[in-house]
Image (tube, rainbow, N blue to C red):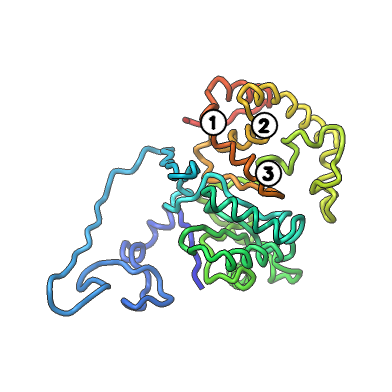
Amino acid sequence: MQVSIACTEQNLRSRSSEDRLCGPRSGPGGGNGGPVCGGHGNPPWGGGSGPKAQAAVVLRPPAPVGAFRESTGRGTGMKYRNLGKSGLRVSCLGLGTWVTFGSQISDETAEDVLTVAYEHGINLFDTAEVYAAGKAERTLGKILKSKGWRRSSYVITTKIFWGGQAETERGLSRKHIIEGLQGSLERLQLGYVDIIFANRSDPNSPMEGVGSVTWSPLACGLITSKYEGRVPDTCRTTIKGYQWLKDKVQSEDGKKQQAKVMDLLPIAHQLGCTVAQLAIAWCLRSEGVSSVLLGVSSAEQLIEHLGALQVLSQLTPQTVMEIDGLLGSKLHSKK
């Protein structure tokens, strides 16, 4: 079982250089050990007589604080960013499975959505042990196994907190993180996941965060204008267990939020986009956001949301100020 752990600079400084650079290893043959690092003596890929290869570590000045380090994929136009300080490159738009996989949509539709996402450069797929009581992980794992994509070409993130009813089956204790992850790996049919997120904070297990991946950029559909004056029969508010969302939509605060969405329509029309695309692009403009998770119920909806990448380049400081003025918000960004 492989676990990716993101450490803060403070945690890294508390360990020796040797510990930081070289983990346990089982030898040149690989195995289940940690990363293999070059160092003193023979290189790990060979031995015996003959020329010795040396590995050099070149230290470069750190990039300015807040540097984006954004790149664009050839052929897809997808943009990639660092996930916090981990060095892991993730697509700025990721695909989430909350509500949809194993619940709202069929497995066939889920496969269509995942395929379109992958073909358009999305490499971050997010799930959680609690989504659809584990069915979301099972659906995602089954699709990934059937597609046969290289495991190194995509990033899987899952979340741990709510695993069961017993006191030891929830929270962020060492016991539940280990056992919860084992359960996730079995459902996903994977040997490892790339990132484990805390689904929420646990006062009994304080921890520090290193990156930002945002979820529900459309506020469960509120920022689409589809709830204007009514609740569609096919939306997620009608799903069992989501009465809270319906109540929110029909509340006074919900109606005020929908009114603000309508105020954004002229800006969206001016930019030639939908309000949903504008909202996603607005989330992406923050330098502190590594990826924005999209929750969609069809491949067509995903294609529409991917159009936010083109809108992002049109968000001038003047446009952002106009949006902030309408929403009464202020996002601090150097971009």
User: Residue 171's spot in the image, x, y percent?
Assistant: 66, 63
Image x and y of residue 224, in percent: 73, 35
Q: Is residue 133 above or below residue 227?
A: below
Q: Residue at x 61, y 51 (%)?
A: 95
Front-most of residues 199 and 14: 199
Q: Which residue is mark 3?
A: 301
What secondary structure is found at the residue carrying circle 3? helix
Residue occupying image coordinates x 55% and y 60%: 156
Q: Residues within 10 Å of mark 1 (few under 14, many from 20)?
A: few
Q: Nearer the viewer, residue 293 or 34?
A: 293
* Sequence-first disc among 2 and 3: 2
Up the image or down, 129 lies above or below 268; here it is: below
Question: Mark 1 — residue?
Answer: 332
For discs 1 and 2, the disc positioned in front in the rendered view: 2
Q: Specify the quadrant of the image occupied by residue 223.
A: top right
Amino acid beneath label 1: His
Question: Mark 3 is on which residue type?
Answer: Gln
Q: Earlier in the sequence, mark 1 or mark 2?
A: 2
Mark carried by residue 166: none
Q: Is residue 72 above or below residue 104?
A: above
Question: What residue do we see at 58% from left, 22% from top?
Answer: 319
Disc 2 versus disc 3: distance between alpha carbons?
12 Å
**Residue 39 location in percent, x, y?**
24, 67
Mark 1 → mark 2, Cα distance in angstroms: 24 Å
Residue pointed to by mark 2: 274
The reply to whether residue 203 is in sight is no
Q: Secondary structure at mark 1?
A: loop
Q: Secondary structure at mark 2?
A: loop
How crowded pointer 3 is (Cα within 10 Å; few <14, some 14-19, many 20+) is rated as few
x, y percent for residue 10: 43, 53
